[in-house]
Amino acid sequence: MRGIENVNFKGKRVLIRVDFNVPLNQNQEIVDDTRIKESLPTIRKVIDDGGTAILVTHLGRPRGHEASHTLTPIAIHLTKLLSKNVIFDRELFSKRTKEIAKESEFGSVLLLENIRFYEDEEKGDENFAKQLAELADIYINDAFATAHRNHCSTVTVAKYFEKNKYAGLLLENEIKNLNKILNTDKRPYTAILGGAKVSTKIDVIKNLINIVDNIIIGGGMSFTFIKALGGKVGKSLHETDKIDVSKEIIAEMARKGVNIHLCTDAIIADKFSNDANIMTADADNIPDKWMGLDIGPRSIRNFAEIISRSETVLWNGPLGVFELDKFSQGTKAIAISVASATIKGAFTLIGGGESVAAINKYNLSDQISHVSTGGGAMLEYIEGKKLPAIEALNE
Ligand code: 3PG
Ligand code: MG
């Protein structure tokens, strides 16, 4: 994988695959622009050199052209961030698009409409990729968060650029930091895993068992483990069909000498709502009609203490339903603990949309060694899988 630092893009048309798949609210306003901001250095490098940046991204998972998934709000926001006019093209391969790509003054930024409006994108279609490639002389992939997708704009297109393909600054930086967290010898090493489902994290946990000293488990997924250990979880979210694999994971951790830390107490509620009745209970003894929606104060103290002793911390997934204030204390406390550990010298890495949203909500992202823009891509990298978009740059 070659980086762009020493490349001069003067007079070149550069197709940059970015990941501007950012969360939007019902008014089509951007809720968190981290991914856009993180790609600005790559875009600026190209245009400051005197090249044309042709940006391609997806947004959401539209089926065909859905007005709710247009990149209009992104184009407007990008114009503000760059303090520069962004040419937004609603077509992909029209005569006009080709003209704009070819004839725009060097230094221009052109944003193509949501690439997932075209079903050929996800099919990795060769002809579609070829047409995309014809718009530019050079290809840069800066879309780390989509690097696990074998799609046209992330993989197929790269082969039409042979020697002229590069990793953008964001992508390079992500890989550097992920390699650091996977190969560090700064110990103790603690992984914090949360989120709703254990099913999406099984392979990650299996790989982390070989790497870390402690695994802290919170969020909905902890109840599958608690149930596997014979606890009563009431109406808490859990996956019955993952109980056996959870038992295997617990046994494997014991064999490898990895400490598993599950929440011992939980904030339980009689409904999934901010106006629910709540109380604190032992996490393995939740009454039938109640559900655990956050970790309790004892778990917070225990987890905070483990994190503060750690030299390396990897965090993915919230510890409770932090979007609802009543159940946000656990995630907030862990965010503060990870930030404090960083200040004391630990190397800390956070990834996954929800954990990043949490760290931003508490204004702590500056206090973390690396905040990854990747969710699924980051998890697959940690699982030890090869990411197709990165392979494509290496071919
Ligand atoms: C993400 O947010 O995970 C990436 O942008 C990839 O999107 P996808 O999961 O819809 O492929
Ligand atoms: Mg995803």
Image (tube, rainbow, N blue to C red):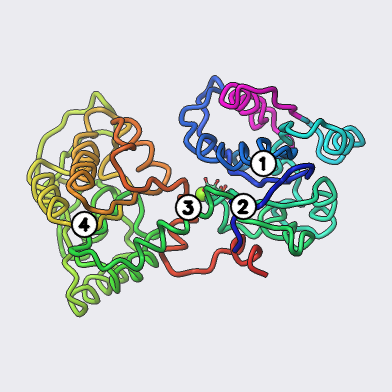
Instruction: Kindly state the secondary structure of the residue where label 3 is placed.
Output: helix
Find disc 4 in the rendering and name its residue. Answer: 216
CA–CA distance between discs 2 and 4?
A: 38 Å
In the image, the segment drawn in magenta is: 65-88
Q: Are marks 4 and 3 in contact (CB under 8 Å)?
A: no
For residue 233, say whether it is visible.
yes
Label 3, ligand 1: CB separation under 8 Å: no
- The type of residue carrying mark 2 is Ile
Does the magenta-highlighted stretch encompass residue 46? no
- The type of residue carrying mark 1 is Val
Q: Which mark is residue 46?
A: 1
Instruction: Kindly state the secondary structure of the residue where label 1 is placed.
Output: helix
The N terminus, quarter of image: bottom right
Q: Are marks 2 and 1 in contact (CB under 8 Å)?
A: yes
Instruction: Kindly state the secondary structure of the residue where label 2 is placed.
Output: loop
Sequence-first tag of 2 and 4 = 2
Sequence-first tag of 3 and 1 = 1
Label 4, ligand 2: CB separation under 8 Å: no
Find disc 2 in the rendering and name its residue. Answer: 4
- The type of residue carrying mark 3 is Asn
